[in-house]
Image (cartoon, grey):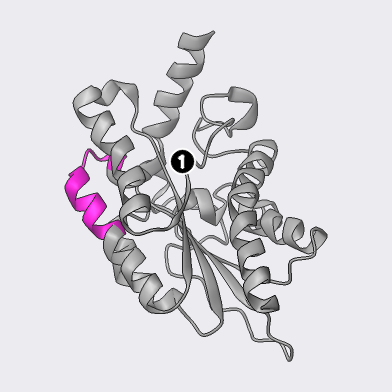
Amino acid sequence: MKRFAHALFLIAIFALTACKGEAPKGESSAPPATPAKTAQSLPKIVAFGDSLTAGYGLAQSASYPSLLQEKLKAAGYAYEVVNAGVSGDTTAGGVRRIDWALEPGVKIVILELGANDILRGQSVVAMKQNLALIIERIQASGAKVLLAGMEAPTSSGIEYRKPVHEAFESLAASHHVDFLPFLLAGVAGLESLNQRDGIHPNEEGTKIVAENVFQALKPMLEAEKQKAAE
C-alpha cells in the first residue's frame, strides 16, 4: 500500500507542469483581476502560488482560498482572501508578478511556489534565491509571510530531495516567517483525495489543504488581533 501511494505521488508530482497552458475553461495563466473594492474594505490575505492555489480542475468556490475565506468568517476573522494563484507558475514567475499582488491593504501573503521548479529539476539554489526575493518584497511592503513548503519526489534522489527540503526550512528561519512544512500534508499520494491526474487535490482533498493553511495561519491572525488591541 505504501508503494502504491508513493507511486501515485510520483505520477502526481510529475504531472504538475502539464497543467500549464491546459487550464480548464475559465482559468487563465494571466494574473487574476484585482477584486473590486467594497465600501468597507477589509484587510487582505493574498494566496500567492501556482495551480495548487488557483484551484485547478475545481469550481472557484471549491479552491482552497475560497474555503479558507469561509473558515476565517466562521472563526470571526474579518479578512478578504485574494486568490493570486496562476497555473504552471514557477518561483521565477512569482518574482515577476509579486509586486502586482501587493496592493494596499494586504496584511498576509501565503506563499506557495516551488513545485514546478522541483518538477523541472531546476537549481535548488536558484529556487531559493527567487523565494527569498519574493519574501523580501513582501516584507518590504509591510505584509507578513506564511511560507508553504513542498517536497521533491523520491525518484529525484537524496542529493536533490535533501536540499529541497532544507531550502524551505532555512528560508523560513533566515527570514523569520511563519512556516507550513508541506501544503499537501495528508493529501499527497492518496488516490481518494486527488483528481485523475494524481497531483491536484479534488474537493475533499482541498478541504484538507484549506485546513492545513488555516491552522498555520491562526497564530498569525491571533498575533494581529493582539497587536490591534494594544
Asked whether the viewer can see residue 114, the reply is yes
Q: Position of residue 93 (x, y in %)?
A: 31, 62
Depth check: give the residue in front, 60 or 187: 187
Q: Is residue 166 above or below residue 96?
A: above
- In this picture, is 39 found above or below 118? below
Query: Image quadrant for the C terminus?
Result: bottom right
Classify residue 38 by image quadrant. Answer: bottom right
Residue 125 on the magenta segment: yes
Residue for badge 1: 181
- For the image, the number of numbered tags is 1
Identified at 39% across, 54% down, the residue is 21
Whether residue 80 is visible to the viewer of this picture, yes or no, is no
| 32 in magenta | no
**What segment is highlighted magenta in the picture?**
118-131
Q: Secondary structure at mark 1?
A: loop
Of the pair 85 and 167, the residue shown nearer to us? 167
Q: How would you classify the magenta stretch by its main secondary structure?
A: helix
* Residue 19 picture location, percent across and down: 43, 46
Left or right position of 40 against 188: right
User: What is the crowding at mark 1: few (fewer than 14 residues within 10 Å), some, or many (at least 20)?
Assistant: some
Camera-side residue: 163 or 48?
163
Against 127, is 1 above or below?
A: above
Q: Amino acid at mark 1?
A: Pro
